[in-house]
Image (spheres, grey):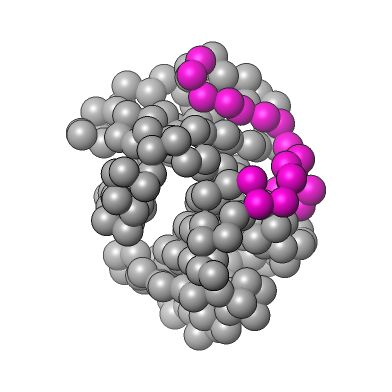
Amino acid sequence: MNLKNIIDNYPTKYSLEYKKFPRYHRIWRLKKILNIISTMISSDRIKGKKLLDIGCSDGLFLHIIKKQFNLKLIGIDRNKDAIELALKLNSNITFKKANAETLPFENDSFDFVTCFETLEHIPNREHAMNEIVRVLKPNGMIIISIPIETGLTGFIKRFARSILKTEDSHRGFDEKNVKNYFNNLCKCDLEIYKTPFNIGEIIVIKNEE
């Protein structure tokens, strides 16, 4: 599967972000996430399972997932325009306008929950994480990607937000505290994968029982 071609042919303004710098980092992240799903879950176990993508935007990630895995897919986003585009481009995937802090699903609804570059934008991300854990089935898996604010990159991000006064709406994570932060919230086993240049991390959380 050629991710570059899929992204280039996905015609919405939201996915244009994948065509800008740092394009390499974004495509690497997608490849890594797809690899995590395919290597950790065998094809016979994944068939018919349910995956929820939080902050799905125009549905690009689920569009890619649909091509590779036989999963029942649901995407949510608080942006109405993005959801309308996602529905238009993916008639075989379910999309809903919803908020991550109050997920409109019953307990133990999903085998997988994904949330990419979204958690840092949520005002009460602890509440959102509690909701993610609530809707995850026993033995389910959460895959999250987050920006890391450390070193020079972190300093630049924090300085820019202080000038733009956006500190409360986009908060990255401290690399030193990531493991403890998610362990305390989820009480589950987790694995951490660093992205190139230490820009971010991919967190894999297993709700094993």
Image quadrant for the C terminus?
bottom right
The front one of 84 and 107 is: 107
172 inside magenta stretch = no
Q: Is residue 209 above or below residue 129?
A: below
Horizontal side of 72 relative to 5 (left or right) equals right
The magenta span reads 91-109
The front one of 181 and 22 is: 181
Residue 100: horizontal and vertical position, in percent? Answer: 71, 48
Q: Quadrant of residue 137?
A: bottom right
Residue 144: horizontal and vertical position, in percent? Answer: 50, 58
Q: Quadrant of residue 159?
A: bottom right
Q: Is residue 131 visible?
A: yes
Q: Is residue 122 visible?
A: no
Image quadrant for the N terminus?
top left
Residue 25: horizontal and vertical position, in percent? Answer: 32, 54
Residue at 76% over, 40% down: 104
Count of numbered badges drawn on the protein: 0
Horizontal side of 58 relative to 30 (left or right) equals right
Residue at 61% over, 55% down: 136
Residue at 66% over, 52% down: 108
Decide whether the magenta segment is chiefly helix, strand or loop: loop
Residue at 52% over, 49% down: 111
